Amino acid sequence: MVQPPANVELRQVGHKLPELLLTQEHHMCPGCGEPLALRGYLEAISELGLASRAIAVAGIGCYTSFSMTMDIDLVQALHGRAPSVATGVKRMRPDSIVFTIQGDGDMVNEGLQEVLHTAARGENVTCILLNNGVFGETGGHMTSTTVLGQRTKSSLDGRDAEYHGYPILIGDLIAQLQGAVYVARGSVHNAGAVARTKRMFKRAFEIQDRGGGFTFVEVLTMCPTGWFIPTLDGPEYMTETLGEVHIMGELKVDGVVRSTEELRAENLRKSAEVEQALARGGIDDHG
Amino acid sequence: MKQLMEGSEAMAEAAIAAGCRFFAGYPMTPFTELHEHFARLLPESGGVCINAESELEAVGMSWGALATGARAATGSTGQGLSLMQESFSEITLAELPLVIFNMARGQQDYFQSTRGGGHGDYRHIVLAPMDIGEAVEHTQLAFHLADTWRTPVLIYGDYLLAHVQEAVDVTPIAFPPVPAKEWAVDGSLTGTGRSRIVSPLGFDKHGRPSEGIENHLRAIIANQERIAAEEVRVETGYLDDAETVIVAFGPPGKFVRYVVAALRAEGQKIGYVRPITLWPFPYDAVADAAERADRVGVFEMCAGQMIDDVRLGVLGRAPVTFIGGISTDGSGFGVGPLLDVEHIRARILALHRGEPLPPLPHNQRQF
Amino acid sequence: MGDVRSGLDMSGTVTIDVDVCKGCELCIGACPPRVLTMSEPVNRLGYRYPELASGCTGCAACQLICPDFVFEVFRSPRDPSNKSGAEGARASSRSDSGAWPERPGPQGQERK
């Protein structure tokens, strides 16, 4: 790595790579949102000092290739089954920090009951959902979180409620369960959202660390390949489709469910704050 | 010291004596009582028993517990195990030492147990105890074999083993040491560059030589070949001059053994082979018996499944006849009237004398 | 590691590990001062990659939005222009605005 010129005193900001990655390279497509979520939870674990107790349980999806490159003790689970596997791990190793990584096809299609029951039992684990509303690994097919109107290879004219049924808002569903204490929906459509999502991960892991109960962090991630759009359009497409239905924010905090209206208002307020910040920084649009 | 105990309780006690620390299951007749005893006994011994919300989740939970290095088990009835088959395939490929209890409804799950209802080339060890005393031994042996070979071991039980009471001794059995579980995850190597992965996929962590899926699958099969060579268990009796050989397993095998002994006392030249491991199947013992006999009979409480393996063992050395049949109680869960010394005796004698088999008895209870 | 392009101005700079870039251009849209542009030449993977012009504030938006982890971000804390630029934006970010990354300290302090 060539360093910048030494004639100016420079301070490094952030890290190029999350500490808990064994290699920089990965097999995700250009513009994929999953590595951004990955950065969030890996850095959250490192920064909270939980690395030496962290065990991951991975499902099956594109992100499975990170099973080999995350420097984390890991159990590879079957499609849909990670929350149950995590339950077994946590019950035998209650002092460890156990988290699952699943996609929407894995969690909300194949393994819906697993995550619901794990939440209802109040297992002291953190379940992470990478939600792009599509089966990315198989090439862009409809999942249970695909929003109405969204075009996939199995909903060619867009998801039609009469023909395909309605999407499941999994975060909202889990928030209703008494066993879930913290439920958040992040997003990686811009740098601010990435940072906000990382804070959600931190809160979830902190709660687990003090034995607080089941925590859930959903992250909306771009899948330009599975959406059949240019990579650069990914963030905007996501906020206009998935993001309009799966509302970003902390859905349940300290066991209290927050309303969608509340979340929308909060997101507007945060956007305004962003605008203000941008104005003060003399920077262009970055909403 | 022997104690009078229901089979389900004896097996749960034996599992805990063998160091089992985790069990997850889903109630189903005739498996339910085994689960009940685990639910009572495991917490008392510092373990965990979860009433899982489905069989799919039960096997997943056990998978997670196994990955931490704990001795763990799951179980159900064949019907419930059908739901777990995907995981059994992959747990075998992940080389995890799962112990599975099948408290089966009769002997209809032979194919499921030995052929694997799941996908792929996998096999795993299947132990078929004939009574509760043997079930106590097999339960402990199962955990030992699972850890020794890093493979699932299934114990084929049934309604009788689950519900009959016998006086049994559940003292822990001393086995040779098993390999250390250096592969087990505890989080301690996270962030050290030496983190572990427990996976069925044949990939190691980045930077370490990975055998790849093809070599991984071949290594699994090589391990299975060693198991097949070393772990065959079988009981035989009266084979030296037997003209007729009867093959049967599990509690029906015990009935057959009793009937054959009685017929021997009457001077009939009949012997038996009782496979104790259904996989690996005792092909050599069957072949050896068939070599000297005029005919082979297979008694199973189902439409005839093990008979396929018997035929593979006999390989044309003698004619093989099925003398068992489907026989259940009115519920379909329990034991049918065919499992009776008089019926079994009549069928064995008919085969021995070259007479037609008597008709199958019907259970009297009809819904 | 291959060709690393860096730019430098008063308040911040980034290094760009162009060899692993997959050319998604998310950084282009994410960069507040619009100082990243895509190259004409392609890297070993066949992708165009971002190049830095002057005017970087070291805000780290590119780092946070990059799926391929190509950016290393540096800031010059003593530069007075830093105050009005990146530092100003940073101050307002502490209210959980959702727009700005957290600013971990220097690598040496952050890592064990």
Image: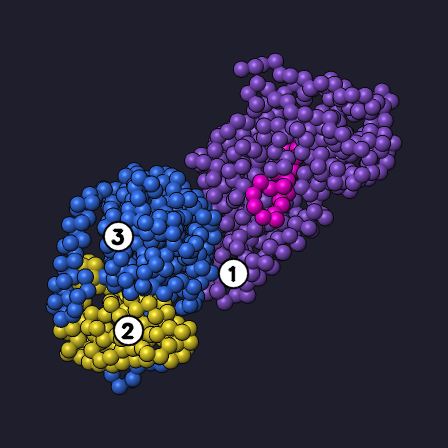
Chain colours: A blue, B purple, C yellow
Q: Residue at x 40, y 74 (%)?
A: C46
Amino acid type, residue under disc 2 in the picture = Val
Asked whether, in this view, residue A82 is left or right of residue B360, the answer is left
Helix, strand or loop under label 1: loop
The correct choice, above or below, for B98 with respect to A15 in the image is above
Q: Are marks 3 and 1 on the same chain?
A: no
Tell me whether the residue at label 3 lies in contact with that at label 2, contact meaning CB atoms closer than 8 angstroms.
no
Asked whether, in this view, residue B112 is left or right of residue A38, the answer is right
Helix, strand or loop under label 2: strand
Residue A127 point in image, percent of width and height: 36, 49
Q: Quadrant of the N terminus of chain C?
A: bottom left
Q: Chain of mark 2?
A: C
* CA distance separating discs 3 and 1: 38 Å
For the residues carrying marks 3 and 2, which lies nearer the camera in this image? 3
Helix, strand or loop under label 3: loop
Q: Which residue is mark 2?
A: C73
Amino acid type, residue under disc 1 in the picture = Asp
* CA distance separating discs 3 and 2: 32 Å
Tell me whether the residue at label 3 lies in contact with that at label 1, contact meaning CB atoms closer than 8 angstroms.
no
Say which mark, if any, is on residue B204. 1
Q: Compare residues C20 and A209 and report the one nearer the observer.
A: C20
* CA distance separating discs 1 and 2: 32 Å
Q: Which residue is mark 3?
A: A241
Say which mark, if any, is on residue B85. none
Tell me whether the residue at label 1 lies in contact with that at label 2, contact meaning CB atoms closer than 8 angstroms.
no
Which image quadrant for residue A191?
bottom left
Q: Residue at x 14, y 60 (%)?
A: A273
Q: Compare residues A210 and A73 and report the one nearer the observer.
A: A73
Asked whether, in this view, residue B305 is left or right of residue A278, the answer is right
Magenta-colored span: B113-136
The correct choice, above or below, for C112 with respect to A216 in the image is below
